[in-house]
Image (cartoon, rainbow, N blue to C red):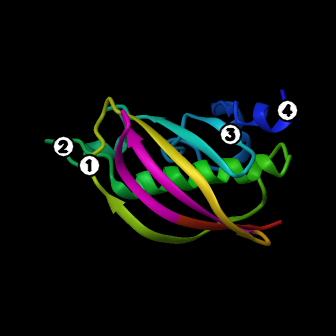
Amino acid sequence: MSESSSQALESADIIEIMRYLPHRYPFLLIDRVIDINGDQSGIGIKNVTFNEPQFQGHFPERPVMPGVLLIEAMAQTAGVLAIRAQGVTERPKLVYFMTIDKAKFRKPVLPGDRVEFHMTKTAQKRNIGWYHGRALVEGTLVCEAEISAMMGV
């Protein structure tokens, strides 16, 4: 088995994610990253539960995951891919979320859903990476966007 094919099968659990990202409850929005292929692609997993704080106000009668949190979860997934691919064992000092383009929200995400954030790198220039993200629930597209971020040293 070649090294590149074994990379596609790698994953990061919550402990590894917390080593890379500064986010903590209630703002750490991914539980695992699977199917990691270097910094080229990977799938972030979010298990949505009713006891998350955003559902107290969004909306009490019909809890819906805010779209901005879906975009943030995409960015966190891309961040894990980019940081992990550098071979470092801890997070960089600075990561700046730079752009969000072509964001579309297609279907509400509800408590009980398992969201998969499929992230694919589309470009890299120095320390800036661009990713295309697709959020799916049970294979149905619920959100998509193009994002970019810059990693500082």
Marked residue nearer the N-terminal end (1 or 2): 2
Q: In the depicted view, which residue is nearer to us: 72 or 81?
A: 81
Percent of width and height locating residue 102: 42, 69
How far is mark 3 from mark 2, CA to CA? Answer: 36 Å
How far is mark 3 from mark 4, CA to CA? Answer: 15 Å
Task: Tell which residue pokes out farthest to the top in this image.
Answer: 1
Q: Is residue 136 magenta?
A: yes
Quadrant of the image occupied by residue 122: bottom right
Mark toward the viewer: 3 or 4: 4
Q: Mark 4 touching mark 2, by CB under 8 A? A: no
Marked residue nearer the N-terminal end (3 or 4): 4
Secondary structure beneath label 3 = strand
Percent of width and height locating residue 100: 49, 69
Three-letter residue code for mark 1 = Lys
Three-letter residue code for mark 2 = Pro
Q: Say the numbered circle drawn on residue 36.
A: 3
Left or right placement of residue 51 versus residue 59 in this view: right
Q: Say the numbered circle drawn on residue 107.
A: 1
How far is mark 3 from mark 1, CA to CA? Answer: 26 Å
Residue drawn at x 78%, y 60% is: 93
Secondary structure beneath label 1 = loop
Q: Mark 3 touching mark 1, by CB under 8 A? A: no
Mark toward the viewer: 1 or 2: 1
Three-letter residue code for mark 4 = Ser
Marked residue nearer the N-terminal end (3 or 1): 3
Mark toward the viewer: 4 or 1: 4
How far is mark 1 from mark 2, CA to CA? Answer: 18 Å
Q: Say the numbered circle drawn on residue 60.
A: 2
Residue drawn at x 76%, y 34% is: 5
Secondary structure beneath label 4 = loop
